[in-house]
Image (cartoon, coloured by chain):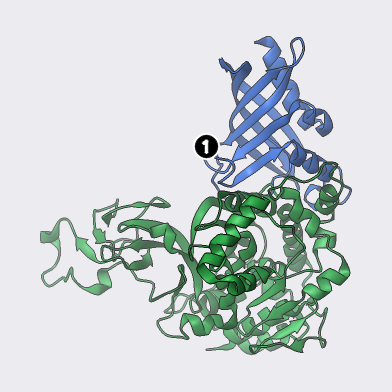
Chain colours: A blue, B green
């Protein structure tokens, strides 16, 4: 449990520290980062999503975040991710399953924007006490609401 | 600050529309057309309460009793399929005390009962039930059509797409569309079963900028190389070969098409503010087997020659002024609703081609995500730029130049104009129409 918590805390901290390449390295090569567009969404191939990134798309997103002329990140945003209510779910297919409540507070153009919701992780064992993310699913409380600009993963 | 109102709800007494001649020139407009609340109110009255506006698609109300709510010309409406199979649309406003009679975005119902005092309306909007009748004055006529939910005076349909107008009179839909109805044909013709349906959900976003900024951007080929440089670079530097299905970075890379390509892609504009830009070099979205199955299904319906004609069309964004743009080749449309001079709501719909292999739908969903998710690597640059333009236009009112290609556009067929892909002619065309609408008493 403590190993899972440490992994999850580190995962979201890497985003806050803009260590995006290290964040990417937490994903298995067939890993998926998914933020559905509505509560209860079950299909990410036949229905739109806020984020539906395989690793190649995560890498493209990171290359853009590193680009000197990414207008949506000028000035650069800042985020603070927090995790709470972390739960271990029953393992499945050799994967460790975890769930948590999250918040991400973002500073964008002098405005502080608050996102919250629930996350689920499907984690493959990776050496002793470490994991690779097979799936991170983020269900925003306001998934289907009118949104503004999003650039940093939740 | 809202202007004082007249009997129809808007006051133009303080605004002399002859002034628009000074604000809208052939090759430039003054920034106040994007910021002035009086002009916004005038737009509302003379554009959004008059012209044909996009409402929805008949697949959203496929069975009797189906309904959805949407916004049209500044207010919420309810669209229903009534028991006789007709599509109806009316204001979501109880005629008793102005409560909303429908609180949910979509569903199936037999009637709409106001939550406040129980006034009840049929699927056709007619008042069918009023509680506490004995208390009303003698002679109060519950059958008076004025007590029905206020109907959208004109609804019209073209190949499954629903348009509405708040004006009781005016050109019919086909006359309004003119040659740009080909944008809708371009989507529906691609369906082997001859019809499309809403499928794949919606993306919704809002930006703190004027609605016209979005409509201009949709036919603006001069911006991607600069505005979208970060996503073009990100996509073109991808280390891996692309999958069979269209990858989300294909469209980002295509935004970086070279000058000769974009110049030749061209822009075509029609009277009424409508226009389209030629297509980008985006690769085929299907596997060889999927493409063969799709093509065979189209040929079975249309024959070889017509199928070739349908698939040869490559238009990137087709604008039906003033509220909707079709990206037919990608099975998506974008609908705008102005909320304030500096606030615009955008809804992006994904469509499924009936009879096409499922991978065509998956590719469409990927495209919609790539281009129009609030987390899109493309859209987010546009939105941040619009928002800063709006700030500048308020803080430093000045001319907005729209003169790329000015004097170089040539007459096209069907009464329109044609220009280089980089021409700002679509914006000039939008403003010529815009000024004519606003100056029509």
Between B402 and B391, the residue placed more toward the observer is B402
> Residue at 51% of width from left, 53% of height from top?
B199
Q: What residue do we see at 25% from left, 53% from top?
A: B117
Residue B293: percent from the left, percent from the top?
A: 58, 55
Q: On screen, A106 above or below B379?
A: above
Of the 4 image quadrants, the one containing the N terminus of chain B is bottom right
Q: Nearer the viewer, residue B296 or B24?
A: B296
Of residues A151 and B196, the one drawn nearer to the viewer in this rendering = B196
Q: Classify mark 1: helix, strand or loop.
A: loop
Q: Position of residue B352 (x, y in %)?
A: 53, 56
For residue B345, say whether it is visible. Answer: no
- Left or right, A131 with respect to B106, comes to right
Crowdedness of circle 1 by 10 Å Cα count: few (<14), some, many (20+)? few
On the question of residue B383 being in view, the answer is: yes
Rendered image quadrant of residue B135? bottom left
Q: Chain of mark 1?
A: A
Residue receiving disc 1 = A42
Residue sitting at x 36%, y 54%: B102
């Amino acid at each position: 449990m403590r190993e899972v918590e440490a992994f999850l805390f580190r995962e979201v901290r890497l985003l806050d520290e803009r260590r995006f390449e290290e964040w990417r390295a937490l994903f298995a090569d067939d890993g998926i980062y998914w933020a559905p567009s509505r509560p209860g969404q079950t299909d990410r191939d036949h229905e739109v999503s806020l984020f539906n990134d395989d690793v190649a798309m995560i890498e493209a997103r990171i290359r853009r975040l590193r680009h000197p002329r990414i207008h949506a990140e000028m000035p650069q945003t800042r985020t603070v991710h927090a995790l709470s209510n972390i739960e271990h779910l029953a393992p499945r297919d050799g994967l460790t399953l975890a769930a948590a409540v999250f918040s991400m507070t973002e500073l964008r153009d002098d405005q502080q924007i608050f996102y919250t919701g629930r996350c689920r992780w499907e984690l493959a064992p990776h050496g002793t006490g470490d994991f690779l993310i097979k799936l991170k699913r983020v269900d925003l409380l306001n998934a289907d609401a009118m949104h503004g600009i999003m650039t940093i993963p939740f | 600050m809202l202007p004082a109102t007249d009997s129809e709800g808007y006051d133009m007494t303080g605004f002399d529309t002859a002034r628009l001649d000074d604000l809208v020139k052939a090759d430039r407009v003054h920034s106040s057309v994007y910021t002035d609340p009086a002009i916004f109110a005038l737009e509302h009255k003379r554009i959004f309460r008059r012209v044909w506006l996009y409402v929805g698609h008949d697949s959203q109300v496929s069975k009797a009793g189906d309904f959805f709510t949407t916004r049209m010309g500044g207010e919420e409406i309810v669209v229903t399929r009534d028991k006789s199979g007709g599509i109806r649309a009316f204001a979501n406003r109880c005629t008793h005390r102005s409560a909303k009679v429908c609180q949910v975005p979509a569903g199936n119902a037999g009637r709409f009962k106001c939550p406040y005092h129980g006034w009840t309306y049929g699927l056709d909007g007619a008042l069918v039930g009023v509680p506490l009748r004995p208390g009303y004055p003698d002679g109060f006529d519950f059958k008076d059509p004025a007590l029905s939910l206020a109907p959208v005076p004109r609804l019209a349909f073209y190949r499954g797409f629903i348009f509405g107008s708040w004006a009781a009179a005016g050109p019919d839909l086909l006359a309004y569309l003119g040659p740009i109805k080909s944008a809708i044909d371009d989507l529906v013709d691609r369906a082997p079963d001859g019809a499309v349906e809403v499928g794949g959900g919606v993306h919704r976003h809002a930006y703190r900028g004027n609605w016209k900024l979005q409509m201009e951007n949709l036919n603006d080929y001069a911006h991607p190389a600069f505005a979208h440089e970060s996503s073009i670079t990100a996509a073109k530097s991808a280390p891996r070969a692309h999958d069979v299905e269209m990858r989300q970075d294909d469209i980002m890379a295509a935004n970086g098409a070279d000058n000769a390509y974009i110049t030749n892609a061209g822009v075509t504009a029609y009277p009424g503010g409508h226009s389209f830009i030629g297509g980008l070099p985006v690769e085929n979205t299907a596997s060889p087997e999927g493409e063969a199955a799709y093509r065979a299904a189209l040929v079975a319906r249309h024959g070889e020659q017509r199928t070739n004609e349908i698939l040869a069309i490559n238009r990137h964004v087709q604008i039906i002024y003033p509220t909707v743009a079709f990206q037919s080749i990608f099975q998506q449309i974008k609908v705008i609703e102005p909320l304030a001079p500096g606030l615009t709501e955008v809804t992006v719909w994904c469509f499924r081609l009936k009879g096409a292999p499922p991978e065509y739908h998956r590719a469409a969903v990927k495209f919609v995500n790539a281009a129009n998710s609030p987390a899109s690597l493309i859209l987010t640059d546009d939105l941040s730029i619009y928002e800063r333009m709006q700030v500048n236009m308020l803080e430093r009112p000045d001319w907005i130049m729209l003169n790329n290609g000015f004097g170089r556009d040539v007459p096209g067929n069907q009464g329109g104009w044609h220009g280089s892909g980089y021409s700002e002619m679509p914006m000039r065309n939008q403003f010529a129409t815009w000024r004519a609408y606003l100056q029509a008493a």
